[in-house]
Image (cartoon, rainbow, N blue to C red):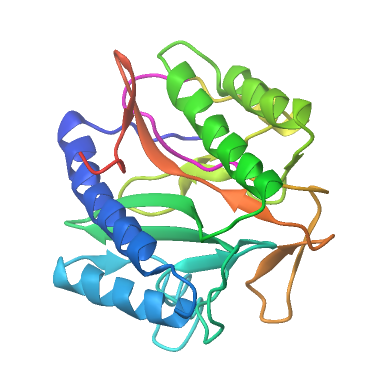
Amino acid sequence: MSIRLKSRKEINLMRAAGRIVHEVHNLCREMAVPGTTTRAIDDAAQKLIDARGARGLFKNYPTYKPGEGFPSTLCISVNECVVHGIGDDRPIQDGDVVGVDCGVQIDGWCGDAATTILVGDVAQDVRDMCAATEHCLQIAIDQIRPGKRWSQIARLMQKYAEDRGYGVVRDFVGHGIGSTMHEEPKVPNFVSRELLKNDIHLRPGVVLAIEPMLTLGSREVKTLDDGWTVVTLDGKASAHYEHTVAVTDRGAEVLTDGR
């Protein structure tokens, strides 16, 4: 496994991409109200990305040929949809949770982050799950420092979630990121034999897209017939949070927080 270390200049360029991702998230929060369609949010996000001179990383992925690959600018995943939801004409309803995953590239460097937006009167157990998912991400950020192994951090994230009865999705994991969206290494939010065999040794210049995904029930998921949309097998709600994070001499530097 070859992990490309980023220089301070490259990390700063990734932060510029991260600012655009953060701006898109803020736009989505403003628009995600009952009656708005996910397609309208997706269209608005594309216009904002274009206005900033950036390129969306999801539209037409993985071929990037017009009309091929993923059909939306954002992954917009509502309620039981875990990841890779496609914008459509379904109106958002009061009580929905809307996961928004956005990736952009500008000046040759990428930023990638996700958040889950709570719309109106969301059930308390779903609110708690969303808070727990976001806390898992914060655990990782707080624990990152040179010399640690990723398995140590993943173990803490997994324990926090499972101790509270949440499913930790295993079919999808985080990833390295840099001049392309997906680089080595794979970044799971749980401990597995594969991770222990190929552990990630954190050192300055490692940049990771860390993205815990929790469910209110079973961790098992399935992909719908469109070949993209991933939903919980039991139909229960899910949450997804993500930041692009650089390892520095001092610890973690979040590149998609808008700073």
- State the residue lying farthest toward the top: 147
Which secondary structure class fits the magenta region best? loop
Quadrant the C terminus occupies: top left
Q: Is residue 119 left or right of residue 198?
A: left
- Quadrant assignment, res 28: bottom left
Q: Position of residue 222 (x, y in %)?
A: 78, 64
Q: Residue 104 versus residue 118: which sits nearer the camera?
A: 118
Q: Residue 5 versus residue 102: which sits nearer the camera?
A: 102
* Residue 248 visible at all: yes
* Residue 84 visible at all: no
Q: Position of residue 63 (x, y in %)?
A: 45, 75
The image shows residue 168, relative to residue 195, as above or below, that is: below
- Looking at the image, which residue is at 82% across and 61% down? 233
Q: Is residue 76 magenta?
A: no
The image shows residue 118, relative to residue 178, as above or below, that is: below
- Looking at the image, which residue is at 39% across and 75% down? 42
- Looking at the image, which residue is at 52% across and 24% down? 139
Q: How many numbered dots are placed on residues in this image?
A: 0
- Looking at the image, which residue is at 59% across and 44% down? 130
Q: Which residues are magenta?
A: 202-212
Q: Position of residue 56 (x, y in %)?
A: 32, 67
Q: Position of residue 178 (x, y in %)?
A: 33, 45
Q: Residue 25 versus residue 220: which sits nearer the camera?
A: 25
Q: Is residue 203 magenta?
A: yes
The image shows residue 229, relative to residue 232, as above or below, that is: below
